[in-house]
Image (cartoon, rainbow, N blue to C red):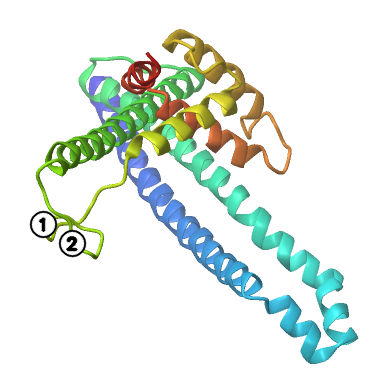
Amino acid sequence: MTLLKKAAGRIIYSLGQLLSFIFDVFIRLVEIVVGLVVGIAKGFIAIIGMGGCLLLFLLFGPFGLIAILNPITILVVLFFIIFPILGQKFISLLKYGKYIFTEYLFDLGSYLMEGKGKFSSFSEYGHKYQRMEEERIRKEREERQRQQQREWEERFRQWQGYQNQQGHQYWYGNGSYNGQSTYANPMTEFKSKYEKSCDILSIPYDSDKYQVKLAYRKKAKEYHPDINHAPDATRKFQEINDAYEFLSDDNIDRYKGMRS
């Protein structure tokens, strides 16, 4: 009986490896197709931005307008708008499926071969995957916040150094001092970006970190693309995330220090 269990465990574990390989190949193919469509869509947007539709109308007159308003043309445009969005969702679904199926098979195979550990239901693997994704997103956000913080600190450091040297450096006619480039005051840009971020989250400028977090959760839930299907929901959701990342504890303290 033990030998049969071990043999079954090896088969199940190998099946998990095969399924993982198939998922990886399929995910990669879908990513290539989505990337290709996004690249073509960006090319179309660039052409339109340079007046491509107007040029078509000028060259072909009413026939150009007919071509633009043709149902096939409209369907093609809609395809290049909708497919990348659906493609990214499909990729996320494939990664989700890969995790719950392969992890289930790996754990079950290991349990049968070694008699140790445990395996759970698919729903429990699904919850675990969601927790992992939330943790990954949180770490990526924190890293972006740290990077932004380092960039702002460097800009303020350069500006402070420039201000300290300004009193005993002599100026050249090209807008530099002692032959070195000048620095723009970052305070105005920082203040503008901070207040714009507060406006996006619909909170007062003197909000603390708890108000920021509460407003972010409310707005993110309202405009999450999985819940809100408005055409601009994805763009607003990204703006909300960007605003939340900028309103870090350090930036809140810096802004309040500017106003004191």
**Extreme bottom residue here?**
59
Crowding at label 1, few (<14), some or many (≥20) Cα neighbours within 10 Å?
few
Residue at image point 79% right, 87% down: 58
Q: Amino acid at mark 2?
A: Tyr
Residue 69's spot in the image, x, y percent?
A: 86, 72
Task: Specify whether 232 is left or right of 144.
Answer: right
Q: Nearer the viewer, residue 34 or 12?
A: 34
Q: Is residue 193 above or below residue 49?
A: above
Q: Is residue 225 above or below residue 48?
A: above
Q: Amino acid at mark 1?
A: Asn
Residue at image point 53% right, 59% down: 34
Residue 166's spot in the image, x, y percent?
A: 16, 43
Residue at image point 63% right, 35% down: 225
Q: Are marks 2 and 1 in contact (CB under 8 Å)?
A: yes
Rendered image quadrant of residue 142: top left
Rendered image quadrant of residue 54: bottom right
Indicate the secondary structure of the residue bearing disc 1: loop
Instruction: Report, in whole angstroms, how far the alpha carbon at label 2 lies from the one at label 1.
Output: 7 Å
Q: Nearer the viewer, residue 106 or 47?
A: 47
Residue wearing tag 1: 178
Task: Specify whether 238 is left or right of 116.
Answer: right
Question: Which is more N-terminal, label 1 or label 2?
Answer: 2
Task: Specify whether 207 is left or right of 232.
Answer: left
Q: Nearer the viewer, residue 80 or 44?
A: 44
Residue 250's spot in the image, x, y percent?
A: 31, 20
Residue wearing tag 2: 172
Indicate the secondary structure of the residue bearing disc 2: loop
Q: Quadrant of the N terminus?
A: top left
Residue at image point 48% right, 24% down: 126
